[in-house]
Image (cartoon, rainbow, N blue to C red):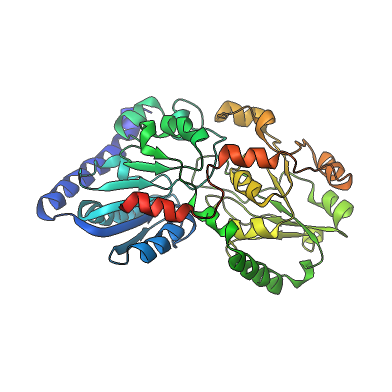
Amino acid sequence: MSLLKLFPTLIIKFILNSFYRCLCFIFKVNRNRVVFASYRSTVLKDNLFYVYNEMRNQFPEKEAVLLFATFKGGVMSKVKYTLHMLKGCYYLATSGYFIVDDYYMLLYLVKPRKEVQVIQLWHSAGALKQFGLSTVGKPFGPSANYVKHVPVHGNYSKAYVSATEVIPFFANAFGMEEHRIKPLGIPRSDFFYNESEIQKAKHTFYRKYPMLSHKKLLLYAPTYRGKSHHQEAYQVPLDLNKLKMALEGEYALLIHLHPYMRNDVVLQSDEEHFVFPIVNEFSIQELLVIADILITDYSAVFFEYSLLHKPMIFYPYDMDDYQKERDFYYDYQSLVPGPIVRSTEELIDVLRNNSLSTDTLAAFQSRFFDHLDGRASERVVQDIFS
């Protein structure tokens, strides 16, 4: 990226840094203030939700601040998000802890004062597709020049991952020393060990969708594609009518898209009683416990789904292009714990012939989860605040 194209970002960086330095001169750090900040959502959810609740249990004296804003693209959205970052400067200057769960622009434009602990609760388990600094110079990732001026994923004090196995990949993606990346677990995965919450989710789901109570549920959860904020309606890369004709009596298909994607899935009228797009009413964790079989491509949800010991199918219909654009940390075909299909017909054959097995899941779990006990939130909170 040329300096000319970077110029607006550099102007904002200068403004934020100047404002931040003034705040640091005026205000002291409140060690009891903890900021939970997210670019992914406007509500408290996933890892931030679990750490927030556990913090309230273990350290009730802490003051929690929620700092959420999404960026949709366009001039007005840029203005609103810049104002949001100015607000974030105050809390970054005055809080003892600043906890995020994904990319967070302010942290890469401003160098936090030393007294602030910046915590990255990355939003997924395991490691498959490359991200962060691992993608510099690739079509998906930032340019080397951009990273020189905007050090993405910089300034983290600690990060938490699901297993020792993936620490080197996160160290590369974040530009961090490995000893600051802790394999204490993914807080949101505690949900899979909470039987009362699981039953509550199932009860709520079947009350809303009673017509699905006697169906086997397929969950199609693809990864995010592209890096633009201007997403078009998603075209499912499966022949949904053909799936319906072959499977409708026994199965139904749920579709859940990545939070960065537009969720208006395009359906034909004759597909509506077989296909059910799920937008906001259920979390991905709730859908995973409800689903009988997961269908995905490169989404990291399959790591968490393995904890449920249920079968999964992989549909990497654009793998050659995806690999050129972004690439993987592992050899995809040897890593995924389920059959790979390349067409709707192959998917139907796998389901009809019951060609699914969970025999490899125990070894897969132990490889990508150092702890299998539902206490990740407890460990992470103790490590952050001890």
Q: How many numbered discs sit on the rendered protein? A: 0
Q: Residue furthest left?
A: 26
Quadrant of the image for the N terminus? Answer: top left
Residue at 37% x, 65% y is 56
Q: Nearer the viewer, residue 220 or 355?
A: 355
Residue 247 in the image: x percent, y percent? 86, 54
Left or right of 117, for residue 44: right
Left or right of 92, for residue 342: right
The reply to whether residue 285 is in sight is yes
The reply to whether residue 38 is in sight is no
Residue 134 in the image: above or below residue 96:
above
Residue 316 in the image: x percent, y percent? 69, 36
Q: Residue furthest bottom?
A: 207
Residue 21 in the image: above or below residue 180:
below
Residue at 65% x, 46% y is 306
Residue 138 in the image: above or below residue 230:
above
Residue 217 in the image: x percent, y percent? 76, 58
Q: Nearer the viewer, residue 56 or 132?
A: 56
Residue at 62% x, 57% y is 264
Residue 182 in the image: x percent, y percent? 41, 41
